[in-house]
Image: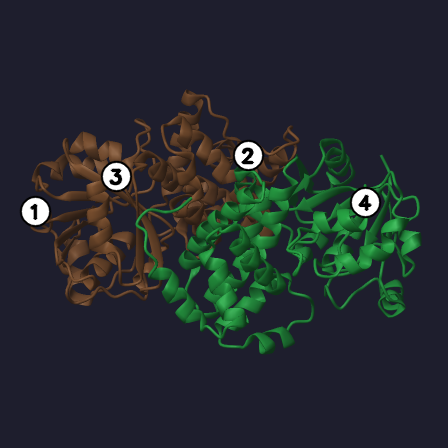
Chain colours: A brown, B green
Amino acid sequence: MAMRVGVIGCGQFGLVLAAHASRCGHATTLWARTPSECEPLVRTRRSPRLPGFALPGAVAITSDALVALNGADLVITAIPSQYARSVWSVLGGSLPPSSVLVSVAKGLEVGTLQLPSQVLRECVPGAEVVSLSGPSIASEVGSGLPTALVAAGKLDAARLVQRALGGNSWRVYVSEDQIGVEVAGALKNVIALAAGMIDGMQLGTNAKATLLARGIAEIARLGVELGGQRETFFGVAGVGDLATTCFSPEGRTRTLGERLGAGATLAEALASMHSIVEGVDTCRATVALAAARRVDMPLARAVHGVLFDGLAPRDALAGLMRREGSAERL
Amino acid sequence: MAMRVGVIGCGQFGLVLAAHASRCGHATTLWARTPSECEPLVRTRRSPRLPGFALPGAVAITSDALVALNGADLVITAIPSQYARSVWSVLGGSLPPSSVLVSVAKGLEVGTLQLPSQVLRECVPGAEVVSLSGPSIASEVGSGLPTALVAAGKLDAARLVQRALGGNSWRVYVSEDQIGVEVAGALKNVIALAAGMIDGMQLGTNAKATLLARGIAEIARLGVELGGQRETFFGVAGVGDLATTCFSPEGRTRTLGERLGAGATLAEALASMHSIVEGVDTCRATVALAAARRVDMPLARAVHGVLFDGLAPRDALAGLMRREGSAERL
């Protein structure tokens, strides 16, 4: 069933989601925030944010958000976590009441420590928010490679997203555990920073695989405390997303961590990136949230130490290897 | 506390375990089955099985198993799953009664469908068997890179292994879930064949990460049915080992799968490998075991189809993408 789909945000993920929605047969409009972003996109169908990718001709592009929102059955918000509030405080009133709002941001808002769907519900009271998450490095999704995602929210809305976006090499699972799916999506970026550091220190795949296992255990502890279901963390949106983020050479968060592991300061590493890296702010928010909830998150604390407290990655690792405890905490 | 350690088997893992035990300060003797394996190892300290690796001078090498077993506190058996019975049927009587037998094989015995510790207990009645498993690509372990493993068995014996082999960049967790740890170690090789096929078909990291998540869920289903604990599969010896096996470019099982994914037949792919690939026999045993226990293992069945029934990897994948079910089964 063809729908009208609006995509808010033209970062990497906004671009490939607009392309996918269009390939699924939906009338798709992509919103670029400023005319200076919009104009070259209209003219070339390409973006410096995702080299090699071209937006299908059928995707309409606009810098007028109302055009993207008007009459949309599905609105996909691909605005980074720290900017969603400012954007949706303005746009919220224009979201058609019957539309489903699909959130693909992966992070925690600094200050409020809220998940993306919680921010959206504050900005757009009454909105039906579905979180869409899973292993989805943008360049691969843009190339049409097989992709599995979880649509989490109220069952009817999640199923609508499944019907709308499943197919064309996508497999979409539905879940009612929105908190679990969003916690997993946010916190994987913190662990991905550590994975990058391991790469930067050239410590090998075994170490990174251990990090993945210990990382998802730590994420699940916080997620369960926040109301998520333990199983979610061991599914596609949990350990699946964590794996692609830790192992794909293309992920921005892992790449930033790699530069830190190789000896760069945070300022130097950030200066070398061309787009927003969700993990940095989310690490700050995660450590605050873990402290507030009294959940022990040694990996997140170690990453925080490297990012903000001048801890050397090697010393952070040594501290983790020295920890007490003879059995694995799961 | 310095011990006497015997290492039975001079494949990749036997070599690096002997080196590690020696670096831990233990008097270590490595058994090579035949004089023709033993002699060049004694002369060069190197093996064509693990290029770049050199055995420390302190490791004694013998082709007389009794020399390796005599007075050993710890005996590490690094014989592939399909050969352990024939070796230990002969050696079993010479194992010192007070020694702990550490099993590092990862597979299921074809025919009996037994786990390595079950085979060992049949061959060496009364032996205290501890299974040592986790993300441990041999070349990295040999280079002294950080390694985390789980020692699973009776608590006292597992703790002895932890004390003996922990340190020197190794972190050893103890677990009483020997079945879970061994099932995870065996079945990861089946999923790694599928991961290699994804690489051979160039389907990307997102697809491989999805396979990892769906793979560990499937492994856990069988493992729980066999008496393992669900948590084990989401720990270092479960999803951790699976991750390194699926993502390290060096793993033999993944490499074999990659050749199959690129179009080679099983015979062609096997001919190009220089050592035993545990996953092939274990896949056969897994499908038989899953059928006997009535556990649904679609990924293992798909790999079996490619290995033995002439199914093309692309058709196997298409079959998996078409499967029914809107929620993830965890």
Q: Looking at the image, which is closer to me, B300 or A222?
A: B300
Q: Chain of mark 2?
A: A
**3D distance between C-alphas at marks 3 and 1:** 25 Å
Q: Looking at the image, which is closer to me, B95 or B271?
A: B95
- Which residue is denoted by mark 4 in the rendering? B125
**3D distance between C-alphas at marks 3 and 2:** 39 Å
Question: Where is the C terminus of chain B found, in terms of image quarters?
Answer: top left
Q: Chain of mark 3?
A: A
> Residue drawn 14% across and 65% down?
A58
Q: Three-letter amino acid code at disc 3?
A: Gly
Q: Let me know if marks 4 and 1 both belong to one chain.
A: no
State the SS at label 1: helix
Using the image, tell me which numbered label, if any, was put on residue A311.
2
Residue contact between numbered discs 3 and 1, judged by CB atoms under 8 Å: no
| Label 1 or label 2, whichever comes before in sequence order | 1
Residue contact between numbered discs 4 and 2, judged by CB atoms under 8 Å: no
Q: Position of residue B302 (x, y in %)?
A: 46, 64
Q: Looking at the image, which is closer to me, A116 or B281?
A: B281
Q: Three-letter amino acid code at disc 4?
A: Pro
**3D distance between C-alphas at marks 4 and 2:** 52 Å
